Amino acid sequence: MSFESLGLCTELLSAIAAQGYATPTPIQTEAIPVIFEGCDLLAGAQTGTGKTAAFALPIVQLLSETIPPEKRRRPRALVLVPTRELAAQVSEQMQNYGRRLSLRSTTIYGGVNIRAQIERLHRGVDIVVATPGRLLDHAERATINLTRIEFLVLDEADRMLDLGFIDDILKVAEYLPAQRQTMLFSATYSQSIKQLADELLDQPRQIEVARRNIAADAVAQAVYAVERSRKREMLSHLIRKGEWNQVLVFVRTRYGADKLTEELLFDGIKAAAIHSNKSQSVRTRTLAEFKRGELRVLVATDVAARGLDIQRLPHVVNYDLPQVPEDYVHRIGRTGRAGEDGVALSLVCQAEQPLLLAIEQLLKYAIPRQTIAEFPQVAIKRGVKAKPSRKSAGPSKSRKTSASPAKADPAPPAATPRRKKAVAERFVPKTGRRGRRS
Ligand code: AMP
């Protein structure tokens, strides 16, 4: 299958070529024809599969076919996303494709001055990429007119529900015309996602691309069992000995992110943190520095890192294990993207054993254990069988894994028609509304 055979116009084919995409990914092959047909779409696809281009390309092409003559155009496509960073990334792709076809795109999210957004909306845009909370503010103030929306995309819908955005999404939907094409992308199909789809989609075509088998194909994983008090030291050791150029480090709390950053800086390792307490301008600047390779370590909380697409990121470290096992898969999906190899290491202390067990039960295999001579190993049990053929990941130099200074644990793991009524109360978000401003 080629991009040409998907019916994309020459402007978009040259944009795709400029990105260096040779062939469509499975989600693109399946979703683009469905969107061109005008059907609603319920797509099971996680981040890293190329899902953004899967909806951005056909939407941009369809919008370009009927550009209204007036200068102050009202938005005709709306993409809802869970985080500001994802909004910025999706909008960047929309702009990249849309510019070639004279379409304008903008982002709407909280944490930044609303006035500049109002001015941009006033000047006229075709595509809006937004987080639900701030978009609803605009809709309620009537600073955005959503009556011309033809395309609605719910991107990472499961994360939006996790972050407690359900009320806002349903309220935003009340401002939209009933005649529209709606696409919902979600990595998981929970009951809440099904209910949301029932509410907002009209006889959707369902597609599901195979979960990216991150662990097996692209990412070498390992667990280092270590005392909590020595995690920072071990991280510095891994970075230095492995001569890592860049690493994304996940921590559980905002406080933990700041503290670890300070400690790494103290160790002479250039690091910065992103989390929801940082201003949006700081977050944007930090991310840009990291993407340009000017920062060696980016320390992030889950919410801030959701959906981040950093090209050629070789290392991810779980400094703290995530509370929700699925977040482990999201986290390690930051590396090993688009055909690259990656290394994902987890520093696990005894108190985190239940979290590790839950992750291994989700993966259905045990992650290989590694040790470093300088750091005495703490006892961490395994809950499931080891995966038979997976190579393990030690600290690596550049993109290759190397045996030294870690040595593999020799023992294999042991077995073990749309309705618009308010339905918010039927949806039970896992984490309340605390993510709204992130
Ligand atoms: P996404 O799932 O949209 O976050 O995309 C993940 C990564 O895959 C991004 O870096 C995209 O630029 C890249 N990508 C998207 N489509 C393709 C393709 N057809 N070939 C290669 N890389 C792609």
Image (cartoon, rainbow, N blue to C red):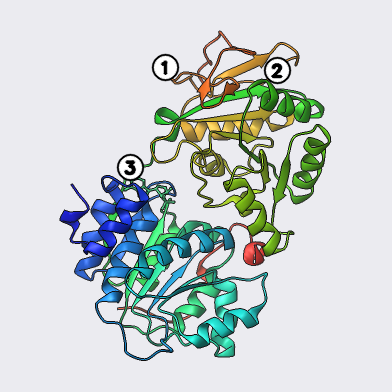
User: How many C-alpha atoms fall within 10 Å of the one at disc 2: few (<14), some, or many (≥20)?
Assistant: few
Looking at the rendered image, the disc whose residue lies closer to the viewer, 1 or 2, is 1
Residue in the image at 75% along x and 34% along y: 269
Q: Earlier in the sequence, mark 1 or mark 2?
A: 2
What is the quadrant of residue 377 in the picture?
top right
Residue at (62% x, 34% y) in the render: 317
Direction left: furthest residue: 5
Classed neighbour count for the residue bearing mark 1: other residues with Cα under 10 Å, few (<14), some (14–19), many (≥20): few
Q: Which mark is residue 379?
A: 2
Residue corresponding to mark 1: 388
Q: Residue at coordinates 58% horizontally, 47% vertically from top-left?
A: 292
Which element type, helix, strand or loop, lies under badge 2?
loop
In this view, 257 is above or below 348: below
Residue 58 placement (x, y as % from top left)? 28, 65
For residue 28, side relative to residue 157 (left or right): left
Q: Amino acid at mark 3?
A: Ala
Query: Quadrant location of the C terminus?
Result: bottom right
- For disc 3, the marked residue is 210
Q: Earlier in the sequence, mark 2 or mark 3?
A: 3
